[in-house]
Each structure stands twice: as C-alpha cells, then as structure tokens.
Amino acid sequence: MLTKQNKQSTQGGQGGGQNAFPIAALLVGATIWGLLWYPYRLLEQTGVSGPTATVITYLVALLLGLAVFRHKLRTVRLLDRETCLLVGIGLSAGWANLAYVLGVLHGEIMRVMLLFYLSPLWTIVFARFLLSEVLSVHGYLVIVFSLGGAIIMLWQPEGSLLPSSYADWMGISAGFMFALANVLSRKDQYHDVQLKSVAVWVGVALVAFGYSLFLPGLPASVDISAYTFLLLLLVGLTVFALSLMVQYGLTHTPANQAIVIMLFELVVAAVAAYFLTDEAMTLREWAGGAMIVSASLFSARMNRE
C-alpha cells in the first residue's frame, strides 16, 4: 500500500532513474562530510578557532550562493506563511554544523560521529509530530538499539549515563539538530533547494558568530596567512557544493531513508581517521557504535507497511 511518505517521495519526478539522483547527492555529501573534519583541524592548528573558521567558511558559501542565485532570489517572497520553516531549517542546521565542527575538533572523530548518528532516534520524534509518520515495529527497534548503543558508549563506572565530555555533548546535540533540520527540510516543499541552502548558510554563520561572542580570550584579529586564506576559501567552496547536494537529497528523500544513506559518512570517516590520526576506539565504543549503526539501518523501514 502506498503510504503518505511514499506519496511524498514521488513528488518532483517519477521512476527509479530520477530517484537515483537524490540518493547519489546524499552519498557524495556523506563522503565530503566524512572528510570535512580534517581541514577544520588544520585551520585550528593555524590559529583559526572552530567557531571563527565556521563563520568564515559559511560566509564564503553564502556570498557565492547569493552571487550564483541572485536572479532567482530577487523573485522570492521571503515573508510568507512558510517563512518559519526556512528559519527553522537555518537555525537547526546552524547548530548542527557548528556542533559537528566543535565535536570533531575537541574529541575523537569516530566517537563524536557515532553519537551524532543517534539522530534516527530524534528523527522518530520529529517525523511523528511534523510529518505525521506512523511508527512501525522497526521504529521501536530503532529506539531500543539507539538507546542501548548510547548507554554502552556513555556509561561511566560511577553509574552516570550523561555525556562525559564537551565533545560528547557536541556530537549528541549535532545529531539532534540535524534530525530536526532533516525533517523540516523534508516538510518544506514550498521552497527550492537554493533558498534552503541560503537559509543554512545564514543560519550557520549567525549561530557560529553568536557562539563565538561567549568565548573568553578571543583575539582582536586573526593573522591569516596565504595558506590559511586559501584553505578557508577551499572549505567555503566545498561547503557551498555540499549544502546544495545535501539539501537536494533531503528534499527528495524520505527523512528516515536519508539518515541511512548518510551512514556512509562513518565509513569514510573511519578510513580517514585511521590514516590521518592516531585515535583508537575501545571495545565498548565499538559495541555501542555497532548498535547505533544497526538502529540507523532499521530506520530505513520505520514507515513501511
């Protein structure tokens, strides 16, 4: 039987060939996300903090987007009854992206990313209330495996289940807000990919700038060398292309399926972390991570009847 979600997924095109393009966009986006932590670590080593690098790189993406889409954006009515969806996408994606950067800068890559991928659990909640998606038995398996994996990874000998580090909090909150941005982007069928991407760039830049105002000991200026400038520019260009691909994929792919496709990011990140860092996960982290990944795989079937 064709469910509401499946009906929505057919909007904008018919046939399996056309459905391959959103999936391909998400796979490429996941690959880039799995590598994007490394240039931010390089920028941190040059003296450009995570929030500052985030502001600059997303401003580069925003300026490029405004230049490329200027003719299209002139005809857009920003103040309409659906503007709240764009604001929600921008702010939730803003925190998700900033928290991701802060997490991978201050924590272990794979641990932060696995905690980020608790997002299917949050997606269940948001999709139920915002998309009216009905939970199936697979949805309950997602809940069980997600919570079980989180408990295994976060449990401390003193009995605490709260995240034990700043990076853990950033990873979890990034996944929470990514799930919200994912569902809101899916819900927003009124605005095109370009406008959603602009909302993301503005949101990330504003959230990162606001966060940086609360950091102590900020330098009055950042001495940016030619190498650092080129790296910032390259990351900004990458963010521009990444945002378009991910927003296109999220708009044309069911929310829970998108989460599973983005799991490819973990594969890329694991390979990259192996060759670029000396980080190693404990057996308990591997076990908890396996349960979280299993939950994400189950989430692909949450709304099938």
Image (cartoon, rainbow, N blue to C red):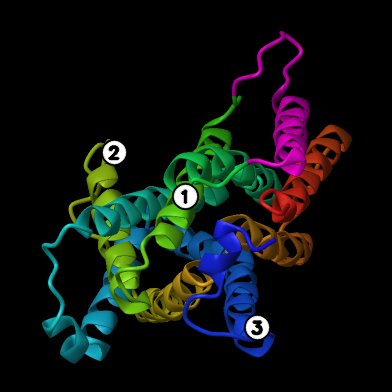
Query: x and y percent of residue 195 in the render?
Result: 28, 73
Amino acid bearing label 3? Ala
Q: In the depicted view, which residue is nearer to us: 243 or 17?
A: 17
Element at label 2: loop
Q: Residue at x 41, y 58 (%)?
A: 187
Contact between marks 1 and 3 (CB within 8 A): the answer is no
Residue that label 3 marks: 20
Magenta residues (range): 135-162
In the image, residue 64 sits, relative to residue 84, either above or below, namely below
- Tell me the amino acid under the disc marked 2: Leu
Q: Residue furthest top?
A: 158
**Local secondary structure at mark 3:** helix
Query: Which residue is the site of mark 1?
Result: 131
Task: Indicate the quadrant where residue 150 lies.
Answer: top right
Determine if residue 17 is in view: yes
- Tell me the distance, in whole angstroms, between the alpha carbons under discs 1 and 2: 37 Å
Identify residue for label 2: 215
Left or right for 204, reference 284: left
Q: How many marks?
A: 3
- Please name which of the two marks, 3 or 2, marks the residue nearer to the observer: 3
Q: Work out whether residue 19 or residue 64 is closer to the camera in this orientation and state it.
A: 19
Locate the N terminus by quadrant. bottom right
How would you rate the neighbour count of disc 1 (Cα within 10 Å): few for under 14, some for 14-19, many for 20 or more? some
- First along the sequence among labels 1 and 2: 1
- Residue drawn where x is 73% and y is 40% of the image: 142
Q: Position of residue 285 (x, y in %)?
A: 80, 37
Marks 1 and 2 in Cβ contact (< 8 Å): no
- At which x and y percent is residue 214? 25, 37
Specify whether 191 is left or right of 44: left
How busy is the neighbourhood of tag 2: few (under 14 within 10 Å), some, or many (20 plus)?
few
Q: CA distance from mark 3 to mark 2?
A: 43 Å
Q: Categorize mark 3 by other alpha carbons within 10 Å: few (<14), some (14-19), many (20+).
A: few
